[in-house]
Image (cartoon, grey):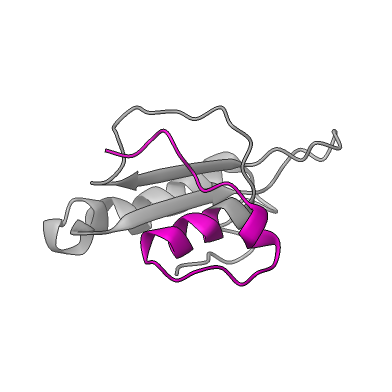
Amino acid sequence: MFIPDIKNDGHDTGVAYASKWLNSYFAPLMKDPAFMKDMLLVITFDEDDKSTSANHIYTALYGDSVTPGSVSNDAYTHYSLLRTIEDTFGLGTLNKNDAKASPIAGIWR
């Protein structure tokens, strides 16, 4: 799990700055077949403009198991991501909000 600092996560700097950090850090790794084998890279940009109560955030999933160019317009939460991980590894749920969450669907190969 990689979590950038408050500067590189775009909180105080914006999307362009965060994108530059993300590209400089992960582009070389994404070109490395050994690193990407069985890897799912989940990128979440949670700096909503705060002008709405909806608080939509952007999340992209990248890896061999994701259909290239696929898009889901379904509403998901962080519990959906947790549920997806739980289901993938057969872990069961924590019987909290993840138990009711829909796993991410419609993008997998």
Q: Is residue 53 left or right of residue 85?
A: right
User: From what the image shows, is residue 9 above or below residue 72?
Assistant: below
Q: Position of residue 85 (x, y in %)?
A: 45, 61
Q: Is residue 99 left or right of residue 24?
A: right
Q: Position of residue 33 (x, y in %)?
A: 13, 56
- At x 72%, y 41%, the residue is 48
- At x 16%, y 57%, the residue is 32
Q: Tell me, yes or no, whether the highlighted magenta stretch contains residue 92.
A: yes
Where does the N terminus fall, quadrant-wise?
A: bottom left
- At x 26%, y 38%, the residue is 109
Q: Is residue 22 left or right of residue 108?
A: right
Q: Position of residue 60 (x, y in %)?
A: 46, 42
Q: Which residues are magenta?
A: 81-109
Q: Tell me, yes or no, whether the highlighted magenta stretch contains residue 89.
A: yes
User: From what the image shows, is residue 50 above or below residue 37?
Assistant: above
Q: How many marks?
A: 0
Please state which of residues 78 and 53 is positioned toward the viewer in this rendering: 78
Please state which of residues 89 and 13 is positioned toward the viewer in this rendering: 89
- At x 80%, y 36%, the residue is 54
Please state which of residues 75 and 7 is positioned toward the viewer in this rendering: 75
Please state which of residues 55 and 48 is positioned toward the viewer in this rendering: 55
Q: Position of residue 103 (x, y in %)?
A: 52, 48
Question: Within the image, what quadrant is residue 7 found in?
Answer: bottom right
Toward the left, the furthest residue is 33
User: From what the image shows, is residue 45 above or below residue 36?
Assistant: above
